[in-house]
Structures are given as structure tokens and as C-alpha cells.
Image (cartoon, helix red, strand yellow):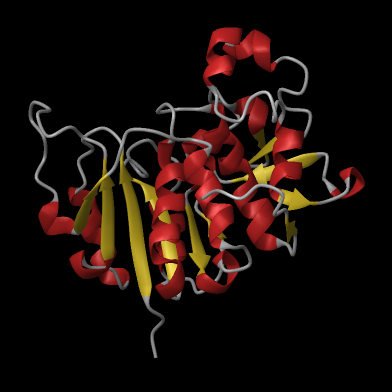
Amino acid sequence: MEPKKTLVVTNHANHDLEWLKMTYDYGCSPENTLIYDRTPDDFVGKSKINHLGKVIKSPNVGSNPYDIGRYIVDHYEDLPDMMIHIKGNLLQKKYTTKERFIYALNSNWLVPIDGGELNSPHNTFRYLTNDNWFSHPMSWYDNSIENLFGKDRLDRMKIRPRINTFREFIHDLFVIDDLDIPQYISFAPAANSAVPKNYILKYSKNFYKKMMYYTDYENNPIESHWFERIYLFAWQGCLTENFSYIVN
């Protein structure tokens, strides 16, 4: 029996989503496509997308990790066998290649949807790339986050000053020794990925509520980038969840 799958799309900015029709050859259809739409109703030239899937209005906060968290929280008790989480401009922005995306659509296992031109050592993110995959040093922002983002913006962040660095963020989510945290952490840009249900259910609904709660104060918070970077780290391993903070 074919695994039940759902394509979860974050539509940030009135993207042209007609390209999603290509997924119909690989087990997707309007019946198993959910589109979290952030485009205001009064946006001039707003595209009609209802024929492409079930459209759910979403606040323009938290980038797509917010919508990933929302989908999982809302469907935690009845998740499909496979979820494919993508941004609506997946191929237009060249996060990945068409071939890699088709591979993910056909997979029954965890697949980072990466390998596009964003991963090229010649692009503006070349300091993050290594042999065509993204990685980030664990020292990321440890000493310079206030200089990078400014004190006023940091003061607006819900979890400040309790969490100030990426390393602290990992400790907030997992019970893990510093010695077990790798020096570099690999990730798929924009958290585009195909994920089996059993990987999702390694962690409680509270884990995914944190994704929403920690990112719902602006459209591109630093915490959304942190979540982007921990998905593969979490889902590939057997990390113990930290329940020290419960989101009601």
C-alpha cells in the first residue's frame, strides 16, 4: 500500500504556485496539498490558489518553521506517513533542483531538499556551504548576536534573555551534553524536507508548539533560522527532549 503523504506549502509572498501541478505525477494532488497562505486578501493581483490545495490563512510570522510547527501541532494525532514541507518558491529561488525534489516526493525516508544553486560555493551563502551542502559552526552568533541584530530587536524577542545563542537554544530543546554537540551542524536551506511520521513523533506536541511560540513575533525572527538548523540534527538522531519549558 502506498504511504499516505501530504505536501505542506508555505506561500510567503503571492508566489506563482501553478508549478505545484508537477507533483501530481508523484503522489500529490489538491486533496493532499495544504497551502499556508500569508498573502493579504487585499493584495493587488492576489493569485487564485484554491484549485491547488486546501488554503489555510497564516499570519506572516516565523517564516516557514512557524507553519511547519502549526501543521504538526494541528495534525499531531493523525499525521500522514510522509510529509513534504516546502516553501512556495522552492524551485524559483533554486533552493534545490527539480531532480532532488522529485527524489524527495518519491521517498519514504527523511530527505533534506537541498542541492540547488543556493548551495553553490559561488553564491552569497558560500560561507555556509561545504561540498554542496549547508553547514553552520556551532559558535554561530555566540558572541555577536547583539551587534548583528541590535538591542531593540533583541528586547522584543519573547525568549530573551533566557536564550541568547544557538547553543543555548539547542540545550533548551534537548537534554544533551556540550561534548555531544558537533562542531558543525548541517541543514537544508529554508527547512525544505521530506519527513516520515515516526521521525516527527520522536518529540512531543510541546516541542512543535515551541516552534510557533518562539517565532510568532515577526516575519523573519532569528529563532526561525535556529529551528531551520536543528530539524535534521533532531530527526536524524535520538536526542532526548527537554521538557523544562511547557507551552500552554
Q: Is residue 139 depicted above or below 23 in this figure? A: above
Residue 22 is left or right of residue 167, and the answer is left
Please tell me in which quadrant of the rendered image residue 143 appears: top right
Residue 31 is left or right of residue 8, and the answer is left
Quarter of the image that includes the N terminus: bottom left
Toward the viewer: 123 or 159? Answer: 159
Q: Residue at x 88, y 48 (%)?
A: 177
Q: Residue at x 17, y 32 (%)?
A: 40
Please tell me in which quadrant of the rendered image residue 141 appears: top right
Residue 129 is left or right of residue 212, and the answer is right
Q: Residue at x 65, y 34 (%)?
A: 129
Q: Is residue 142 depicted above or below 180 in this figure? A: above
Q: Position of residue 13 (x, y in %)?
A: 26, 32
Please tell me in which quadrant of the rendered image residue 61 appears: top left
Q: Residue at x 70, y 35 (%)?
A: 136
Q: Is any atom of residue 99 visible in this view? A: no
Q: Residue furthest right?
A: 179
Q: Position of residue 7 (x, y in %)?
A: 34, 61
Toward the viewer: 155 or 39? Answer: 155
Q: Position of residue 82 (x, y in %)?
A: 45, 70
Tally of numbered discs? 0
Toward the viewer: 245 or 31? Answer: 245
Toward the viewer: 247 or 70? Answer: 247
Q: Residue furthest front?
A: 248
Q: Is any atom of residue 26 visible in this view? A: yes
Q: Position of residue 92 (x, y in %)?
A: 32, 38
